[in-house]
Amino acid sequence: MKLFENNYRSRFKLTSDQVFYWVYGMDTEESKRALIALLNVVLDRKDDPIIEVRLLNPVQKGFVIGDKPTVMDIKCETSSGELIDVEMQNGRLPFYPERSLFYGGKMVNSALEEGEDYDKMKKSIVISFIDGVIFPQVQCLHTEFLMQEKQAHFTLTDKLSIHFLELGKIDG
């Protein structure tokens, strides 16, 4: 196949916001299938797989090198009502955990319609792929943060989780 006879594919890194968006956020059937597969792996959804997503912000990205850079951001809702924000973060990592918390807070803030009871709140999930390392104190590639009681470690609520996948921890 001619597609595989050239080296163009090696020039496009999946950690590029643009390429990440083309693969997972284009709101095509192919990109939705890729996004669903990615979410099921990251969230370890073997027993309760995500089967459908609806993109909430099909943002048009610039398609020419040199276009104004934008922050990668794919927001979607699963068929079960979970709100998910998927980020690809390159470079500037200072305060990124706080930024992820801010994104999560914004999602929680939009997880209820006006007048709805709190028990109807949708689960909000932030997934950040980090092209680098932000938690050198742990060896694991994938960390998940929840709202837990400090000493007894019981979960206050499962309505917010924040995941980080530190690609810089993958051997070269």
Image (cartoon, rainbow, N blue to C red):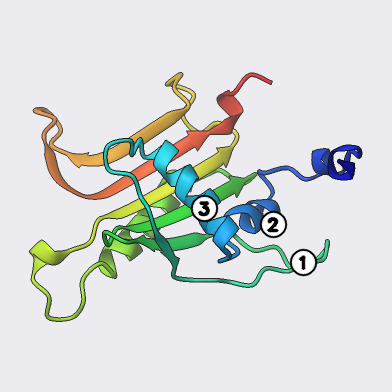
Q: Is residue 87 visible?
A: no
Q: Which residue is mark 2?
A: 18
Task: Return the disc, 2 or 1, that comes first in the chain's sequence.
Answer: 2
The image quadrant that residue 90 belongs to is: top right
Amino acid of disc 3:
Arg
- Res. 33 mark: 3
Q: Is residue 48 visible?
A: yes
Q: Are marks 2 and 1 in contact (CB under 8 Å)?
A: yes
Amino acid of disc 1:
Phe
Between 150 and 169, which is closer to the camera in this rendering? 169
Question: Where in the figure is residue 76, as x and y percent of width and height?
Answer: 42, 62
Question: Where in the figure is residue 96, as x and y percent of width and height?
Answer: 48, 46
Measured in 3D between alpha carbons, the distance from the residue under mark 2 to the one under mark 1, in whole angstroms, is 8 Å
Measured in 3D between alpha carbons, the distance from the residue under mark 1 to the one under mark 3, in whole angstroms, is 22 Å
The image quadrant that residue 156 belongs to is: top left
Residue beneath the point at 43% across and 45% down: 39
Task: Return the disc, 1 or 3, that comes first in the chain's sequence.
Answer: 3
Residue beneath the point at 62% across and 57% down: 21
- Res. 37 mark: none
Residue beneath the point at 77% across and 66% down: 63
Between 76 and 166, which is closer to the camera in this rendering? 76
